[in-house]
Image (cartoon, rainbow, N blue to C red):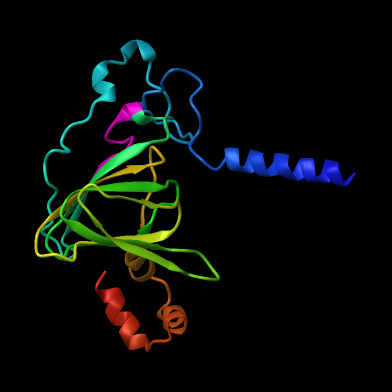
Amino acid sequence: MASHVLLLAILALSFSYSLASDPSPLQDFCVADLNSNAFVNGFVCKNPKLVTADDFTAHGLDKPGNTSNPQGSAVTPVFVEQLAGLNTLGVSLARLDFAPYGLIVPHYHPRGTEIMTVLEGELYVGFVTSAPDFKLFAKIVKKGDVFVFPKGLVHFQFNYGAKKAVAISGLGSQDPGVVLVPNAVFGSNPPINDGILAKAFQLDKKIIDYLQSKF
């Protein structure tokens, strides 16, 4: 009896894991029909007879992103919205540009692991594990180095140097999503009650109100 229970538990875990990622394709490809009004988990398929090589091609990653912003960073995504051929394939890409001392703020991707390689410059990167440890794994990575950020964990990338930096990230979803922690906490619409945030961060409400005003 115990062996049967164990087998059922293993099967249940395997089944739940199989559902915890992008859907697997049931044909060679399913190019996204970005103009369809149908509501599905992802995008409906474009008529295969109308698909061309252009549906599997994207351009522009050779061009630096605009880092003229308070964070001094830019992300140029190649997700399914930019490359319809990614639909159902479970992968995507992004170019990361950093001005000197530029930062991609703490954030997480709810639907994909991120693996990053540095093309130019040096970055201080890291991620934090979930409760109860909240352990920080951080490291300086240089040109040619690779660092992986596990799915769903808060992480950051910071150019601590006086020269620009460039990196490329691969992500394990056609649409990994991104939740910027500062924006989610202090810039939600409508705002989170300042009393709740004051209690959570153990700060005066006036400080919370000031932080919310920045977003």
In the image, residue 22 lies at what x, y percent?
48, 37
**In the picture provided, is 81 more to the left or to the right than 45?**
left
Q: Nearer the viewer, residue 125 or 76?
A: 125
Say if the magenta span includes residue 172. no
In magenta, the rendered stretch is 76-85
In the image, residue 35 lies at what x, y percent?
33, 29
**In the picture provided, is 171 more to the left or to the right than 13?**
left
Image quarter hosting the N terminus: top right
Q: Nearer the viewer, residue 118 or 31?
A: 118
Can residue 189 be seen in the rendering of this structure? no
Q: Quadrant of residue 103?
A: bottom left
Task: Tell me: residue 84, above or below residue 95.
Answer: above
Task: Tell me: residue 104, above or below residue 214.
Answer: above
Looking at the rendered structure, the number of numbered marks drawn on it comes to 0
Q: Residue at x 78, y 40 (%)?
A: 7
Image quarter hosting the C terminus: bottom left
- Residue that extends furthest to the right in the rendered view of this protein: 1
In the image, residue 183 lies at what x, y percent?
32, 65
Q: Quadrant of residue 208?
A: bottom left
- Residue that extends furthest to the top in the rendered view of this protein: 49
**In the picture provided, is 121 more to the left or to the right than 18?**
left
Q: Residue at x 23, y 59 (%)?
A: 123
Q: Residue at x 29, y 77 (%)?
A: 211
Task: Tell me: residue 106, above or below residue 3.
Answer: below
In the image, residue 92 lies at what x, y percent?
34, 38
Can residue 56 be seen in the rendering of this structure? yes
Q: Nearer the viewer, residue 204 or 5?
A: 5
Q: Residue at x 24, y 26 (%)?
A: 57
Q: Quadrant of residue 175?
A: top left
